[in-house]
Image (cartoon, coloured by chain):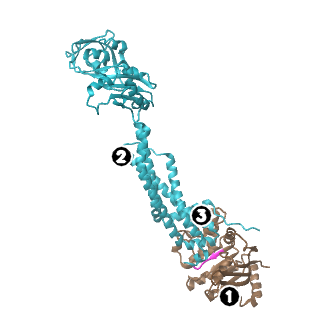
Amino acid sequence: MRLPVVELDQVQRVFPGTPPVEALKPADLVIYEGDYVAIVGPSGSGKSTLLHLLGLLDQPTSGTYKLDGIDVSGLSEAERAGVRGRRIGFVFQSFHLLAHRTTVENVMLAELYRKGKPKDRRNRAVAALEQVGLGHRLDAFPTTLSGGERQRVAVARALTGEPSLLLADEPTGNLDSKTTGSVMELFDDLHRDGLTIATITHDSDVSARAQRRIRIQDGQLSEPDSESRAEEAALAGSRVNTGPAS
Amino acid sequence: MKPKKSHLSIRDLLSEAAIALTARPGRTLLTAMGTVLGVAALVATLGLAKTAGSQIVSRFNELEATRVLIRPDNRNTGRQDDNQVSLLPWDAGDRLQRLNGVNGAGTKSRVSVNDLIRSVPEADGRNEYQLSVIAVSPGTFEAVRAELLTGRFFDEGHSEGKEPVVMLGLGAARRLNVTRVDNQPAIFIGDVPVAVIGIISDVAREPDLLNAVIVSDGFAREQFGLQAPEEVHVDVDLGAAQLIGTQAPVALAPNEPERLRVSVPSSPRRARSGVESDVNALFLILGGVSLLVGAIGIMNVTLVSVLERRGEIGLRRALGASRSHIASQFLFESAALGALAGVIGTALGVLTVVGVSARQQWTPVIDPWLLLAAPAVGALIGLLAGTYPAWKASATEPIAALRST
């Protein structure tokens, strides 16, 4: 039986104001270990709100959110930061690599807010870069990398420290179709290795690769093909069990 | 189960600050410039004041500090001749000797003798010389710290008895070819025969004695019509000069002490504080103002950089940084910038002190604590200047920051 990574129970987010905006209507969502979920929806629908709630960058107005079984609703700011740093890897549309640092230094940032020796950090960063196929560009600066390479560096950074959940926000939004393909293949590989992935996208090619699609419209969460969910979950579970990394 | 809090070690904090400052070195230096100048101005000001102050102290020497000289003040009076007679008593030396702190005191007066001095044993054919004649009281030898080469000093008995005995300074003795005094050789002041009873090899003060024929007060009054002592020399204990300077006129001329002019060494402490307050006030203000300007400069640039680095701030939050980690990172950066500015400013300040000292041929003197305090002041400036930007940075919403490109 796969364990749930994300459990949302009647999670609601209301932004204060006159009138208050209900960005996310009370929603239930469970994402299991090894799931590959695409969150789709028009702009302004509440996609980002959901992503920030999932990424602990924002707090729900009501409801409970359990990540890896930990109720994160009641945590202090520093504790949430700790959970975020250890259990969630982020990939952003605009990569967010620091321009004055080399590839490997950028990846090493992932463990800055944790205890650990610099040498170990470097070793893990190198391993992550090799995993995304950039073992030969360790000391390159981001400005000399192509868009696809930059996003691979960002993915390597997100993978360092073995997060429970990879959260991607329009990961291919700044890429052309060719590099989009290569990054998506990387995501497929990671999914095959058993990584839990949630990605926001409005690219249908990207969402088609995901095993689950969650639609959000006017703050209302729905899973159109949830009838096939059990079947798919069983399939994905078997993949995890027989996959190379398991 | 309590989740682990995120963590940021001091070493990582330092290395992050170092990377941030070295990423754009030109900008870092320009940002630091105001603080550099402020610290340099403060260090140079304090260093130069200290250096100048120490100069006066090093000029202060023991010999000068223990010397008191008293003369009648005839600058503001038209009746100088008759007054002079009454002002300085012949027993001035004895009177001052009684004061606590006086080692020796005596009078000294030039005696006008138009005749040449003649020696009896003819040396190289010439035996007449133009030498000055000086009348002293016995205490004067102590007051000028005279050293005897041979023979003896004359005493009160010689003076009171108006005896025709003299002493010779070493130079005068050589001229007159007097080398031994055990047989009390005679020389002539004009036509007056006198016996040489001693030769002075050296004096600490009043070197004109070394080239003079020295007679006693009593003999000078009797033989050459000396009217009154010209000046009174006093050798005092170290530190007693100021006190003796106030007491001596009263002891010498109780009725009109204000008419005596006393030369005492200037108090070194007073000279020093005078120099410091002169130099310091303006330049300390200037230094303070440039520090303030420097702090505002750091604050402005750090604020701009907080806006520029919104994406980085958002990323760091996503990577597990808490608000306080973000704040401490920016605080550390600006404090490190301030400390860097402080170090450079201190170096410039020290160079200024050394340069000025070299030009003035002074010995540069700088308080060691200044070299430690100045970079610390720089760091403090940086810390204060970074407070507001750091707060702004920590208040940055990661969501908005990550969405901006």
Location of mark 3 (residue):
B328
In percent of the image, x 27 and y 14: which residue is there? B222
Residue closer to the observer: B320 or B294: B294
Residue B197 magenta: no
Query: Is residue B364 visible from the viewing direction of this image?
Result: no
Answer above or below: position of B191 versus B247.
above
> Residue type at mark 2?
Arg
**Residue ranking furthest to the right:** A1
Rendered-image quadrant of the N terminus of chain A: bottom right
In percent of the image, x 40 and y 44: which residue is there? B275
When asked about the image quadrant of residue B131, the answer is top left
What's the distance in space between the residues labelled 2 and 3, CA to CA? 46 Å
Quick one: SS at disc 1?
strand
Residue closer to the observer: A173 or A46: A46
Asked whether the beta carbons under mark 2 and mark 1 sit within 8 Å of each other, the answer is no
Asked whether the beta carbons under mark 1 and mark 3 sit within 8 Å of each other, the answer is no
- The hue of chain B in the figure is cyan
Rendered-image quadrant of the C terminus of chain A: bottom right
- The hue of chain A in the figure is brown
* Dominant SS in magenta: strand
Quick one: SS at disc 3?
helix
Report the magenta residues as a range: A89-93
> Residue type at mark 3?
Ser
Q: Position of residue A155 (x, y in %)?
A: 62, 75
What's the distance in space between the residues labelled 1 and 3, CA to CA? 40 Å
In percent of the image, x 46 and y 65: which residue is there? B27
Residue closer to the observer: B221 or B373: B221
